[in-house]
Image (cartoon, rainbow, N blue to C red):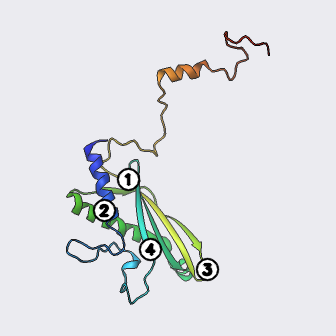
């Protein structure tokens, strides 16, 4: 792994780690990611339960956002548009925080749309888990797990497989038993 790749991965990891609920900026102000939990007063108002996490797989960043919604919000609004906007806010925060940490820019290109899974908890509340993948620019020497695999067998192992005995009825010359 090159030094550049390691710097990108560490920067993304630190930006993700700094996004916990209640995190403060260098000047003591709360970090704003764009989540519902940031609305209202932390003590006096009931706050929404939501958060996100990210993981890197090959050359892709996979963001997962989790929230609790009222059942009427699932049916009454454009849920996919709201989730897309929330993911865009999270990516905006990650890019901004990455730039503060590493002094470099982070390139994230979406590779698809939001994949949402909504489960009913009771007659009023649902749980929503949304996932979206982004391609990270600047990771040139990383093998992408999503690319089709290539056969790269060692010469000796390929020779062993070519000898195979699965489809043949003949016995090897060193077998002496009768049955």
Name which of mark 4 and mark 3 comes first in the sequence. 4
Q: Earlier in the sequence, mark 1 or mark 2?
A: 2
Task: Report, in whole angstroms, how far the alpha carbon at label 1 lies from the one at label 2.
Answer: 17 Å
Q: Is residue 178 left or right of residue 106?
A: right
Q: Which residue is mark 1?
A: 135
Ranked by sequence position, the earlier of labels 2 and 4 is: 2
Q: Earlier in the sequence, mark 1 or mark 3?
A: 3
Query: In the shown orientation, is residue 165 left or right of residue 110?
Result: right
The C terminus appears in which quarter of the rendering? top right
Give the CA distance from mark 1 to mark 3: 37 Å
**What residue appears at the point 41 percent right and 56 percent down from the top-left corner?**
55
Q: Callout 1 environment at 10 Å: few (<14), some (14 to 19), or many (20+)?
A: some
Indicate which label's residue lies in the foreground, 1 or 3. Answer: 3
Q: Nearer the viewer, mark 1 or mark 2?
A: 2
In space, the residues marked 4 and 1 are separated at their CA atoms by: 24 Å
Which of disc 1 and disc 4 is earlier in sequence?
A: 4
Image point 79% across, 12% down: which residue?
Answer: 178
Quadrant for the N terminus, please. top left
**Residue highlighted by disc 3:** 122
């Amino acid at each position: 792994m090159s030094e550049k790749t390691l710097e990108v991965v560490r920067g993304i990891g630190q930006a993700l780690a700094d996004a916990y609920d209640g995190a403060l900026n260098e000047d003591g102000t709360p970090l704003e990611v764009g989540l519902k939990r940031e609305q209202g007063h932390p003590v006096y108002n009931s706050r929404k339960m939501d958060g996100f996490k990210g993981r890197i797989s090959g050359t892709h960043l996979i963001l997962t956002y989790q929230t609790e919604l009222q059942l009427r919000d699932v049916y009454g609004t454009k849920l996919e548009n709201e989730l897309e906007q929330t993911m865009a806010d999270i990516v905006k925060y990650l890019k901004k925080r990455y730039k503060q940490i590493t002094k470099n820019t982070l390139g994230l290109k979406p590779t698809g749309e939001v994949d949402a899974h909504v489960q009913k908890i009771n007659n009023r509340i649902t749980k929503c888990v949304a996932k979206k993948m982004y391609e990270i620019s600047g990771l040139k020497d990383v093998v992408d797990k999503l690319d089709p695999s290539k056969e790269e067998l060692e010469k000796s192992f390929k020779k062993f497989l070519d000898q195979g005995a699965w489809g043949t009825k003949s016995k090897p010359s060193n077998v002496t038993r009768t049955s």
